Image (cartoon, helix red, strand yellow):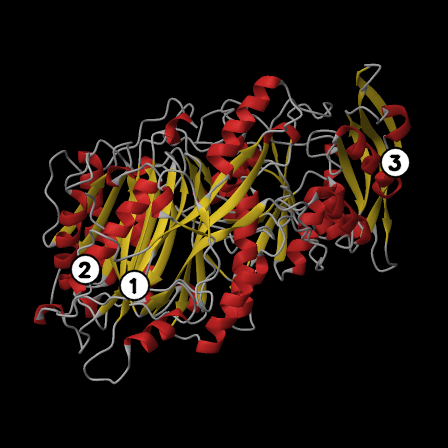
Amino acid sequence: MKVVALVSGGKDSCYAMQLCRSYGHEIVALANLYPVDEDVDELDSYMYQTVGHQVITALSQCMGLPLFRRKIQGQTREKGLRYTKTYGDEVEDLEALLRAVKSRFPEIGGVSSGAIASDYQRLRVENVCSRLGLISLAYMWKQEQPYLLQNMIDSGLHAVLVKVAVLGLDPKKHLGKDLATLQPLLMKLQDLYDCNVCGEGGEYESLTLDSPLFKNARIILDEFSIQLHSADSFAPVGVLHPLKFHLEPKSDAWAPDSCSAIMCDDVSNMPASTESVAQSASDAPGPSLEGITLGESQPKGVSVLVNRQQHGFVVLSCSRLSDEDATQEVQDELDDLLKAAEVELRNEKLSWADVIYVHLYLKDMSKFVKANEKYMAHITEKLCLRGVPSRCCVELPLVESGMGVAVVEILAARCESKEVLHVQSISSWAPSCIGPYSQATLFQGLLYMAGQLGLDPPTMSIVSGGGADEMLQALRNCEAVGNAFTSSQGHNRKECLVLSFSVYCSSGSSVEERKQVEGVIRNFFQTDERMFTDVDDRGCHRAVNLFRSLPGALFLYILVPALPKGALVEVAPLSHITRLIDSSSEEDDEQRNECWRETLVDLSLVQREANSEGSSCQGSTDADESDLQHGQRIYLCAPCKGLILPHYLCRAVSYILPGPSEETSTSRESVQALACSGGVVSVGTHDPSTSGQGLKAAGRSGNGATAPSQRGCSFTDAMSECMESMSRTLEDASLCWADVVTFRLYFVGSVIRAHDVREAIEVAMARCCKHSPPAPVGPRPTLVPVIALGENSDMQALMGVELTASGFLAKRL
């Protein structure tokens, strides 16, 4: 990719160029913003570093690249974290500068910047790039600063300090000193005062005098003055003002006179864009649903299932119900489904800005690009001022199950407090999300993470080596995203605890690969806190890890026809962000600590046996002919397993397994053994004799798996039994069906038709909800046809049901 590099002259922007070059990009131009008054060293800017701007033209000569410059004419008007186009803001100078570069070099596709930790700067660069159709490249984003500084020094980059503003750095002693000399002192200041060794907190600024990219010459500072901005006795602030410098050639073939042909274009006179803009995010018009009017009917043939949770969540499941093979193009059907979703959101007095998560199911992944274009036409950053929703996309056998060619499930709520992580820059941190979908959304303590592939973040390509290597990379990507929501700060330590994993395996993966994938997940979380020391040549490091999996985390393995980018695996964790308060704090903090420990940390696994007293299935093996599919006469319901926090949270999964068929001689016991192979440890089992008194520890069942019911029953009765065990699990959490947020039913599409599932679920929910007020009807699940599924990589279940319920404490916490 051809790239323009934003340069301030500092170490960060110069090292970012080195990383761009190492990943195969070609830097074709430099771009710089500087003060209107050239005698001023530093502006009061949230966005730009200008100390040493007098030397910037020398970078162009040293690298032999054209330089575009613009005077900073705007001011900081929009101070919020998220930026919308604002007239007169200094960010619009960046837009005008890059627009000028692109007009001269239309082949440019990316913009390099030195962003490391500032969301404020990164989001503004991404905003401008998205407007100009460019990709932001920020390869240093979220890298650990001590290792990053070491990598800069080791690479041969030579930079000196041109500003100091922190306790421990003295303008008279340290300005003009190089980073390699000051590195031990910077590390000491980090230990003493928690300073940023790369200066991300404004501790210092630097000026690069030499770099491996300076092919022609290096910069020599001949004369400079030190100007004190603050003579504070503890932390004086001062800057280095260059007075005289020259270029020292690196070869006899180059001379300063030879740089005359290099273009240095000042575009300060080019006006900033004068298109209609909002003065600020707060003044911007609220999200609207263009073309949608209240009460508008749904597109013909589209069904929208609406589940309303009593605490404000709304789930929309949009599909086209048809028993015939669908012939409509995927993108056209998705367009209809999203239009229908817009109508329902409007009817619920919600908008795309309130959407937390989207599940996108397609019949043909080869049509993903066109489908994604339709998605981006409906869900835009302009309509989602609080952040775009996270998303998971897979291919499903929809047509074979009579469900059209696309299904969309949308989770929404009035979520002014939601926290969205949306990084569009390509970096070494985690895969970028270039478009209106985010890496993760945190709402009411639950972290809804987008489906992660085994993408190598800096190259955005699937790693080689097969399914196991892809899963390892996908988990590392999940870890990077999860850690972005954690904190290791003493009195406000936050951890990311994974409650469950939805593991999608492509049909292109082998049985052996899927077993290896399961092993990778199991081994990934062997220790509570992991320190990464296996550093690659990119300098990717992470410190103490606060991304952990609960010992009783629930697993749902799903075999699907295909995944995006031809991946073999995709994982979508659901996590809980916990806050741990230091017990050594004040008494009121100790009391809060007890509350958090009770409600947020002690997630317990409860197991509900099927076929308990009062169940709809009493061991009968008689089944109606309408319940029989492909010779299956008996169905077995496995125990429901749930992670619960009383009054607050319940995450539960249950499976229905195939019973023996008349066409086979397989005994019921052998089917159970087959279904239980490669099982899961039961951490806790509900003891009816101690109902309401907590959990009773349990050992392994058989070979370690969760044993299914010893009775068989018809399909409808098995479904009823499954729902009743779910209902009792909700009761264990002191919750009910009205608290259910997400509710999905996965089924093997080649064995069971969606129509039969709908009929069975109506009977099942009517049975279990009539005694469970305040939800006499109960929610209806999103139907998800798959090739195979199960609680482990053997995937021998016929159906699986998963739900998440959230109680009234969610709002208080």
- Mark 3 residue element: loop
The total number of labels drawn is 3
Please state which of residues 108 and 687 is positioned toward the viewer in this rendering. Answer: 687
> For mark 1, does the 10 Å Cα neighbourhood hold few (<14), some (14 to 19), or many (20 or more) residues?
many
Viewer-proximal residue, 190 or 108? 190
Q: Determine the CA span between mark 2 and mark 3.
A: 80 Å
Disc 1: which residue: 709
Is residue 420 rendered to the left or right of residue 165?
left
Q: Is residue 304 left or right of residue 70?
A: left
Dots 2, 3 in contact, CB < 8 A: no
Instruction: Check disc 3 and give the amino acid type.
Output: Lys
Which residue position is annotated with label 2?
617
Residue 177's tag is 3
Amino acid tagged 1? Ser
Q: Residue at x 51, y 56 (%)?
A: 107
CB-based contact (under 8 Å), mark 2 and mark 1: yes
Density class for disc 3 (Cα within 10 Å; few <14, some 14-19, many ≥20) is some
Seen in the picture, residue 783 relative to 659 is either above or below; the reply is above
Amino acid type, residue under disc 2 in the picture: Cys
Left or right, 479 with respect to 7, comes to: left
Mark 2 against mark 3, which lies toward the viewer?
2
- The x and y percentages for residue 543 are 68, 46
Q: Is residue 664 visible?
A: yes
The disc, 2 or 1, on the residue closer to the chain's N-terminal end is 2
Q: CA distance from mark 2 to mark 1?
A: 10 Å
* Quadrant placement of the C terminus: top left
How far from the left and from the top, in percent, is residue 273? 44, 33
In this view, the residue farthest toward the front is: 689
